Image (cartoon, helix red, strand yellow):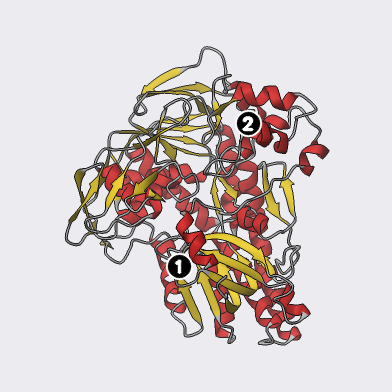
Amino acid sequence: MKKPLEKDFVIIGSGPAGLNAAIIAANLGVQVTIIDENPQIGGQIFRQTPPEIYRKKHLDKQSEDTFEKLNQSIIHNNIKIYSSSTVWGIFEKEESQAQNNSEINSKIIATDNREIPLIEARNLLIASGAYEMPVIFPGWTIPGVITLGSMQILLKSQGVIPEGRIIIAGTGPFLYLSASQLIENGANVIGIVEASSMLDWYAWGMQLLRFPSIMLKGIKCLRKIKKAGIPIYFGHMVVDAKGKDKIREVTISQVDSQWCPKRHTKKTLQTDLIGVNFGFMPSSYLTHLSGCQHNFDLEQFCWISQFNNVYKTSEKNVFVAGDNTGIGGDKMASIEGKIVGIEVSRLLGKLTKEKANLSHKQLLKDLKSYNWYKKHLNKIYKFKSGFFNILTEETIICRCEEVDYKTIKEILKDPSTGNLKSLKNILRTGMGRCQGRFCYPTIMKILSRYISTKELQKEDFTVRVPLKPLPLKKFIEVSQ
Amino acid sequence: MFKRIDNFVRGKPFKITVDGELFSAFPGETLATILLTSGIIATRKTLKDQNLRGYYCGMGVCSECVLMIEEGFEVRACQTLAKPNLKVKTLL
């Protein structure tokens, strides 16, 4: 096996958390290695165009200015960035290889980048962010039913917008931000299907008065949507999508506050593309792979790594920061990244305990002002059980292995097989290309109807290498 | 289905081959961008039910947009930058 490159501080993910951790640690004299799977740094929120594509006009000035500052500071002698590098494995360092006790806790990271096939990380920050919460409906696997985030990524990083009639569906602020950006750039959005009622929506708006900058941004987006004459279907959800080769039409229905469709309120809309977003979900795959302990979050139906006040996980020298610690947005992520950057610098002897404590105290204070916003977001995106009335027996739950609702229910309602592991053994759910990323949240929701909350919280899953699909050739490269 | 907008300046176009057909591409574009701007969203068929699938999450998580690049590699179209003369196959 190849000998891993030894590194003091490895950061996986170059979003706001990863970048801020890197900058603060590098400035204190720590050698930092950043690994990111995308061609450009910035993560999802600061998605950049590649150097070959140049954007003439701003899409979102505020966010672009924030990134520009980070982008300048990240050019640092102490920071080495490996982009287009996907981490596919994280392993324990074998004890026989370790020379003393402190080294036993290093993690070995395997990537698909030939330059860094294996890295030994003495300190590891996992800032893997989040992905879109899959709230599904019959027909969600038809080509042209895509995540709203993927539409925004195409616009931000490739300068591409959808053509034809576009429907935006889901709930929460991201719908309006994306809609306004799409409209501004010439896309034909024909409707926004918002699961929450207009009343809920005003209530949130009023609460946002505590965050004037966010509120102002929201009002700006809404104005653009209104000016373009786009209808917002409040208290509606998509209950069906139809089309064989591609999406042709969707059926929407009025829903109650628990997302239960109301009778005789269905309406069919012709469409060419639908972008769905019900909020975001912390990505726990890398923390699972690192052996960290997780808690199951009953509001968002996802696993979140346990961490302490300096964002250290249950694993020695493994830290987390940003949206994978719970969805809080870029400002929280930045502060969390700084906290980890300071802590790792202290561990590496670049900072005294007193100085580190002082910095942490201030950062935790800054963080507190955003806690409320985080709670607010979680409330908006909270899962509602009326959702089960939208599913049909034939609705595909597991995209990869093509398993439908009826089949999953049958296994889960039997107490002897009513758990994630049995389901995986019997139906292969979670064994396809996405490794359960898009079915586990739904499966856990279904499971919650058959087992107690206490039992549900005990459910966890095992992540296997390779984390992302990987050609065998890459395995061989590493083992030679 | 998707189009490039003028607010972005691009370099000199080149060609890639998808299932034996020539497609126009610009430097810095992902395989997903090239397919979507050419009107192709479905890029694979499911094994069991032969249903069409394609671009979904756009950020390398779902792997629904997998393509075969000629060396026998499966790649995610949304995460892979196109290079001149690249030959790819859909899984249709």
In the visual, does B63 lie left or right of A479? left
Up the image or down, A47 lies above or below A416; here it is: below
Check disc 1 and report its element: helix, strand or loop: helix
Up the image or down, A38 lies above or below A107; here it is: above
Q: Residue at x 65, y 62 (%)?
A: A369
Q: Residue at x 27, y 61 (%)?
A: A53
Mark 1 and mark 2: Cα distance apart in space:
46 Å
Q: Position of residue B56 (x, y in %)?
A: 43, 41
Name the amino acid type tagged 2.
Leu
Q: Is residue A471 visible?
A: yes
Q: Nearer the viewer, residue A172 or A451?
A: A451
Q: Nearer the viewer, residue A436 or A235?
A: A436
Q: Nearer the viewer, residue A396 or A337?
A: A396
Q: Residue at x 68, y 74 (%)?
A: A362
Q: Position of residue A385 (x, y in %)?
A: 66, 29
Q: Position of residue A165 (x, y in %)?
A: 31, 32
Number of dots carrying numbers: 2
Check disc 2 and report its element: helix, strand or loop: helix
Are there few (<14), some (14-19), or many (20+) residues within 10 Å of tag 2? some
Up the image or down, A39 lies above or below A456; here it is: below
Q: Nearer the viewer, residue A376 or A326?
A: A326
Q: Residue at x 75, y 67 (%)?
A: A309
Mark 1 or 2: in front is 2
Q: Is residue A321 visible?
A: no
Pinpoint the chain carrying mark 1: A
Residue linked to disc 1? A66
Residue linked to disc 2? A427
